Amino acid sequence: MTIAPSRLVTPPPDRSRPRSTLAGRGTSTVLPLVVKVVLLGLVAGLAIAVTPALVRDGSWVFVGGLWAVVVVLLAVYATKRAVPLKYLVPGSLFLVVFVVYPILMTAQLSSTNYGDGTRGTKEATVTRIIGASAVQVPDAPSYTLAVGTTGGVADGPFTFYLVDEATGDAFAGDAEGLTELGADDATITDGVVTEVPGVTLLTRSQINDAGQAGGGLEGFTVPAGENSVIRQQGFSAVELTSPLVYDEAADTITNSETGEVYTPQRAASGDRSYFTAEDGTRLSDQSWGESIGLQNYVRAFTDPAISSDFISIFLWTLLFAVGSVGSTFFLGLALAVVMNDDRVRGQRLYRSLILLPYAIPGFIALSIWSGFWNRDFGLVNDLLGLDVNWLGQTGTARLAVLLTNLWMGFPYMFLICTGALQSIPGDLKEAASLDGANGFMQFRKVVLPLLLVAVAPLLVASFAFNFNNFNAIQLLTEGGPFSPANPTAGGTDILISYTYRLAFGNAAQQIGFASAISVLLFILTGLLAAAQFRATRSLEDVNR
Amino acid sequence: MSTVAPTTGPTTRAGGRGGSTPGDDRTRAGRRRRRWWQEVGWRHVVGVLAIVYAIIPILYILSASVNPIGSVVSTDLFPTTISWVNYEELFGNPGRPFVRWFLNTLLVAVVVVAGQLFASALAAYAFSRFRFKGRRGGLLTLLLIQLFPQFLAAVALFQMFTDLGRSVPQIGLDTLPGYILIMLGGALGQVWLIKGFFDSIPIELDEAAKIDGAGHAQVFFQVILPLVRPILATTGLLVFVGVFGEFLLASIFLRETNIKTVAVGLYGVLDADRSNNLGWFAAASVVVSIPVVLLFQYLQKYIVGGITAGAVKG
């Protein structure tokens, strides 16, 4: 993970003449060896330093990944074998860890219902449901409360430090249950735990914050017997007993007072389960995270609201990508052809100025353009003397997005077309003109085909880029305009901005579903790109 | 550039005006003038139009940045009053630590550029100089992966760094090192471009060095790398611009004021009050853009060749 970038500049320039320094095999390998050992040592040292924290939090995937990286590095660099790997490994490791692994994780998430309301595990949900139904019975013990954590004061993990108000016995309680505290484990002052070695005790205001809705302490209970839990009540804690009993083997919750049995059942939406009685009443509206197979994909294609969104958004995404590439390429090519004539004075100046939009960071240009389309103060209406509510209707908003993207992209196309035109040998054109081709025919029959061969891969890449050009949509229209009837899919939404809203938007987050759409996007992008590459046969030079 | 010159005249008359005079050599002044218009003059007209189109938004940014009121309503294409007050406000406002954001971005950009160039150059060397099993597959895989925006996996990345940050807070969410690591996921993004240039270096150079006793590493660091400095500079610039403009992942991963990059920071300011923060945003934009624009102008001719060989602005 620590690849010293400075090595890029380390070879002293005056050593670039081989003969003077490369005396013979083996003699000049001391410095590289030192560098190698130091770097490998650094990586291993970092891994050793980080491992305890990962083990503490039970992040076994990361522990495994980290040591796999170390082993790979050692295997590749500490031996003399596999020379190509020595050059491929640094970048590939980053690629695998931060691109490929997240892609696989996305695929895995797409088979779950993970999101708002389903973040908890099933056990935690069962505990919560039972805890919520618990009531205080007469003679139940009550405790003074201190809350400790070994992590952050906002998100735990938390432990309750309890002192029985009647007997004075002290306990530590977490989701596992109660453990009795010995005299050495904690300091007790006036019947309250005031100090625990190695643990941060929360202040009253921190307890308040964490206990609020959405806080880390919300719903935190300590099991204290068959159906009893200990729960925070202000700054003390009480033992509550629930009529509900969870039977782990049968996976049912039974109400011991009424005898009603609740079993987990998928709701009609297909992506959430609830404990439901035979007559269909739900015990609770709390659900939990679980694997739901291909349900997210089924939903994307069959839920009428979503699938019609999906198809119309997909079509607009295609139109947007094709329109963006087409318009920028056409304008860029035309300008490149027009300006590619050395009799034009100030050619360099023209080129420099035409290139300016390409050099302006995209987010700046898009934010500014977003203002240009404003109906009342926007530059477009101002300069053209119009009064169009550009971003207010789907049709004009789409046009505005395309026109903006034309400005953003045509200098790039101008640049690559200029480059390609200049690389076409002049004698080819000469030969064509000797054969009697006039200007336009010569362009169409000789220049254009050669140019297309050169820029086709770039057009494909540009298409793929625009197909997922989140910036252009998010910074210009944020996907809008939205109709009141459908707040999740806007008129200019492309698939990726739609996905973004599902996953990170203000409404209830549907991470599992958003992941499924991401996977579909991966597949679509790949298929479209592969088809285009095949069509342009631009991969010939791979075989070189 | 100039080698193509003599033949381009009549050939590229795509405008298609009067094709009647290709071989006509009479040189009366009026005719010559008309011919100049037909072959060259109109190109100037097109060029000027293109420039106007290209720079109107940029003029607007400049104008807004010197507009002391700084609101959308009061901003026009050409400034009526010129004041530097927006530029002065870039400094010393703790709620909008522009300098901090700029330095954050520079730090990220420098590390990511160095990391990407180094990793890409190494891999390009392997692909260009060694023949090994899976070479072709590897190249194709790289090309395909490059087409997938890393952002598609943002949900998973977010999850991953939330978990990671719990154990190792130094690289969790809301940290620059974490963000840098994510950006380094694209470390092999420039392989194709650099490989193209490695391919153009005669292999005899390597062989000569090897006869002198150089190992593969010495060939790479001492023979090849020094020869491809121009392309490294160009690629570096493209990556640099990419990092400067990267908005998506940064907007998800960098939420605390002091660790934002310019993209997220500036957007946040503008988005908070679109009509009244325009002046400040424009001034900041000008400061951010100037170095990039200058670099672009300086490296223009390398970029033309470089991009055509395979790079894409991301």
Image: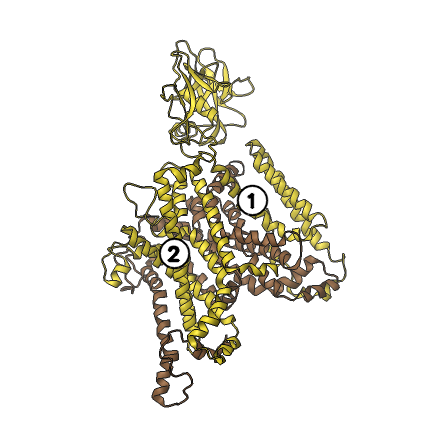
The amino acid type of the residue labelled 1 equals Val
Distance from the alpha carbon under mark 1 to that under mark 2: 31 Å
Disc 2 marks which amino acid?
A: Ile
Give the x, y percent position of residue B65: 33, 59
Examine the rendered structure and indicate whether residue A176 appears above or below residue A472.
above
Q: What element carries label 1?
A: helix
* Image marks 1 and 2: residues in contact by CB distance under 8 Å: no
The subunit carrying tag 2 is: A
Chain-order first, disc 1 or disc 2: 1
Question: Which residue lies at the image location 44% right of the left edge and 71% below the top edge?
Answer: A444
Q: Which chain can be seen in yellow?
A: A
The residue lying furthest to the top in this view is A139
Q: Is residue A335 left or right of residue B172?
A: left
Where does residue B145 sit, x and y in percent of width and height?
A: 53, 50
- Look at the image and name its color scheme: by chain
Q: Residue A364 carries which label?
A: 2
